[in-house]
Amino acid sequence: MGHRLTKIYTRTGDDGTTGLSDGSRVGKDSARVRAMGSIDETNSVIGMMLAELAPEDPVAGMYIRIQHDLFDLGGELSIPGAALVAASRVEWLEQSTDELNEDLPPLKNFVLPGGNRAAAVCHLARTVCRRAERDLVTLGIDETLNAPGLQYLNRLSDLLFVTARVLARRNGGQEVLWQQQLRT
């Protein structure tokens, strides 16, 4: 393990900058820091979802691994030019999505966030993940990024959607389907 944090505040960010892992400093409002923050927020909302699941739940085990992946992705962004997320992790997300989706009925309507607390929090994680993806795209306009990182967020939002559908149907529950209202 690297350095241990014994002092949490450093005062080095009081000028509106933050340090990256390569020793450089950037503005706290930079595209890189915004993307890192959105990834961290995605990870936090997934933590909220995990608090709704039993530790032995297979979905919980899958998302704990995803939390580690997201931490790796944040680390990748904190070291410009680093590549910590492998394409194999993207493939794993695809396989996981396919497995969860196998037993779900085909969609005929849009799904509204809700169904139960776990599903609603999962939908929140999905929307925050989509923002993280947009923030990473913005960073990629000016900087070269490791392609699997962006692909990872795209696939993760898909997995979160399918997971929300699964969670909403647990214990006899159901998804909340959008119904187009007639306009007068």
Image (tube, helix red, strand yellow):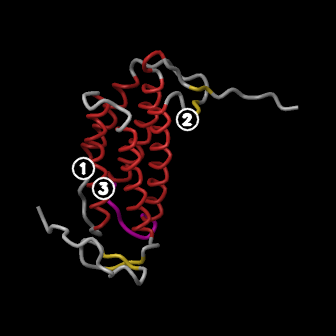
Position of residue 79 relative to residue 174, above or below, is below
Q: What's the residue at 36%, 27% (across, down)?
A: 98
Q: What's the residue at 39%, 69% (across, down)?
A: 143
Q: Which mark is residue 73?
A: 3
Residue 181 locus on image (x, y percent) = 76, 29
Q: Specify the quadrant that holds the C terminus.
A: top right
Position of residue 142 relative to residue 177, above or below, is below
In depth, the one of 182 and 146 nearer the eye is: 182
**Left or right: 164 as drawn, with respect to 180:** left
**Of circles 2 and 1, which is in front?**
2
Residue 151 locus on image (x, y percent) = 37, 48
Magenta residue span: 140-147
Q: Specify the quadrant that holds the N terminus.
A: bottom left
Q: What's the CA distance linking mark 1 and mark 3?
A: 10 Å
Mark 1 sits on what residue? 86
Q: What's the residue at 30%, 74% (across, down)?
A: 9
Q: Which mark is residue 16?
A: none
